[in-house]
Image (tube, rainbow, N blue to C red):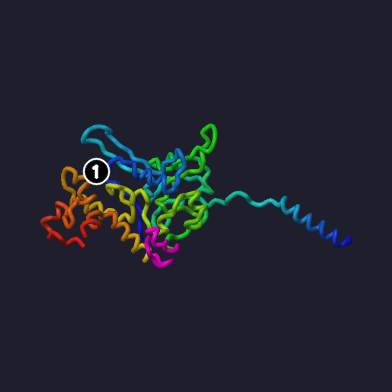
Amino acid sequence: MRRGLLLLSALALAIGLNACGERDQVVVYKQGKYQGKPDGLPWDSESPAAELRGGKWTKGDRNSWEDQIKQRQLAQHEHKRIYQ
Amino acid sequence: MARMKFLCDAERCIECNGCVTACKNEHEVPWGVNRRRVVTINDGVVGAEKSISVACMHCSDAPCMAVCPVDCFYRTDDGVVLHDKDLCIGCGYCFYACPFGAPQFPQAGAFGLRGKMDKCTFCAGGPEKDQSAAEFQKYGRNRLSEGKLPACAEMCSTKALLGGDGDVIADIYRERVLRRGRGSEVWGWGTAYGPGRPGAQPPQQQQQQPSGTRS
């Protein structure tokens, strides 16, 4: 009984004191370097469903993503879009 | 490697503000923040009025990146300049540095208190999981990860605003300038909307190609 109480107090003490710990809350800056979170790559996403009218590419394949985005860019070319 | 850029053809822009509306709608941009806007010079002067759609130009050597005291800007592999809103302190240095006035600051409280900077993302979201709710809430939609181009460029009715790989859109613009005619063809009514007859060719092409080649 006494041992259990001792263990419980030790545990409560450990948890309680944990809040008093001092952690570095300031970002360590490296001058001129991006400090934020890493971003994902657009070609690592799945191609959207057909009804969303997005592109089609192989997930993770940058070249296939670039190919289809280039096709989409050329759709802005009215000479090629209308008079084909 | 693609270098994503915008190109606005001042001869074609009709100041319809469709790009501004498309951007606001696509990203649910809050009141008071305009990631894109249309600037007009010589407003009302017949023959001298020119408009251009302006947003972040995703500079190759971006001054906003250079002046940011917390280094929250980064450039993606496609040349899109983005920033991490979790790091931004809303100091406004980027606004002073930007020659296009692209950085916007939502009013976050009383006494003109500024919120975190918001700007055009080239519809590429930000440093959150792509197409996640957090990304949409902070940065708007990530159309590039859906294989799409920025909504403003794709929505432009006269195709004055082009968006995409700098080389590709420069080629489109160059070819357009070479074919550009006179009168309404300067801003491309016929080429943008077609002549209204099936199989017809634009005026400049009539002698070069036989009619009825439309597939």
How would you classify the magenta stretch by its main secondary structure? loop
Query: Considering only vertical position in the picture, is B114 above or below B168?
Result: above
Q: Residue at x 21, y 46 (%)?
A: B189
Q: Is residue B94 left or right of residue B156?
A: right
Q: Residue at x 66, y 52 (%)?
A: A23
Q: Residue at x 12, y 60 (%)?
A: B210
Instruction: Tell me, yes or no, if residue B75 can be seen here.
Output: no
Residue A79 placed where, x, y %?
Answer: 22, 55
* Quarter in which the N terminus of chain B is drawn: bottom left
Q: Is residue B146 magenta?
A: no
Q: Which residue is mark 1?
A: B11
Query: Considering only vertical position in the picture, is A69 above or below B9?
Result: below
Instruction: Please state the extent of the stretch shown in magenta in the rendering.
Output: A44-63
The secondary structure type at the circle numbered 1 is loop
Instruction: Chain letter for mark 1, please.
Output: B
Residue B173 placed where, x, y %?
Answer: 25, 51
Disc 1 marks which amino acid?
Answer: Glu
* Quarter in which the C terminus of chain B is drawn: bottom left
Query: Considering only vertical position in the picture, is B81 above or below B39?
Result: below
Occupied quadrant, residue A13? bottom right
Q: Is residue B90 left or right of residue A56?
A: right
